[in-house]
Image: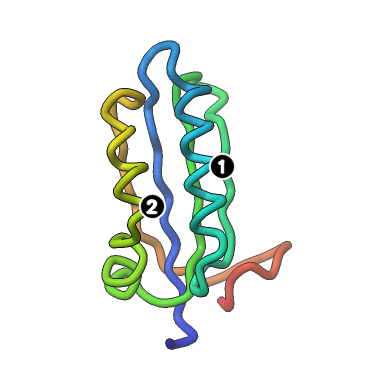
Amino acid sequence: MTNQQVQLNIRFKAKPGKKEEFRKELYSLIEEMSSEKAFISAIVSDDLDQPDDLIIYETWKGTRDSWLAEEFIKPYRKNYEGTLGDLIVDRSVSWLQPKGEWGSHITNA
């Protein structure tokens, strides 16, 4: 594995009345994925201006291609993906590569 890192910034829009149920599913996923060798960190935030939105910011060792080849295929992700249709309206993913960091030491930027 390289010393590269990739970050995912994922915004979810929960269905009305489903945010806390979705949060429970998301936290279960994070518990599973946090034991992966390439996992570095995950931060979940509520959007103060969009009350149905949750954002997760994940940092992983590797590249987008290695994440897709090694992490996306995990069996626990299939179970999680199967729950999303009942819980969210939309999801948008941004793939990021860290280039600078201040105040923490999560990345190697």
Q: Residue, x 52% and y 74% (percent of image)?
A: 37
Q: Is residue 83 left or right of residue 99?
A: left
Label 2 secondary element: helix
Question: How far is the residue under mark 2 from the one under mark 1?
Answer: 19 Å
What type is the residue that disc 2 sits on? Answer: Tyr
Front residue of 80/47: it is 80
Disc nearest the viewer among 2 and 1: 2
Front residue of 61/36: it is 36
Residue under circle 2?
76
Label 1 secondary element: strand
Q: Quadrant of the N terminus?
A: bottom left
Taking 60 as reference, is 11 above or below it? above
Front residue of 10/109: it is 10
Tag shown at residue 44: 1
**Coloring basis for residues:** rainbow
Q: Is residue 12 left or right of residue 54?
A: left
Taking 29 as reference, is 62 above or below it? below
Q: Cβ–Cβ below 8 Å for labels 2 and 1?
A: no
Q: Residue, x 40% and y 45% (percent of image)?
A: 10
What type is the residue that disc 1 sits on? Answer: Val
Q: Quadrant of the C terminus?
A: bottom right
**Residue 19's spot in the image, x, y percent?**
47, 22
**Residue 68's spot in the image, x, y percent?**
28, 66
**Residue 59's spot in the image, x, y percent?**
51, 63
Taking 51 as reference, is 69 above or below it? below
Q: Is residue 106 left or right of residue 54?
A: right
Taking 3 as reference, is 92 above or below it? above
Instruction: Sort mark 1 into few (<14), some (14-19) or many (20+) by Cα contacts within 10 Å.
Output: some
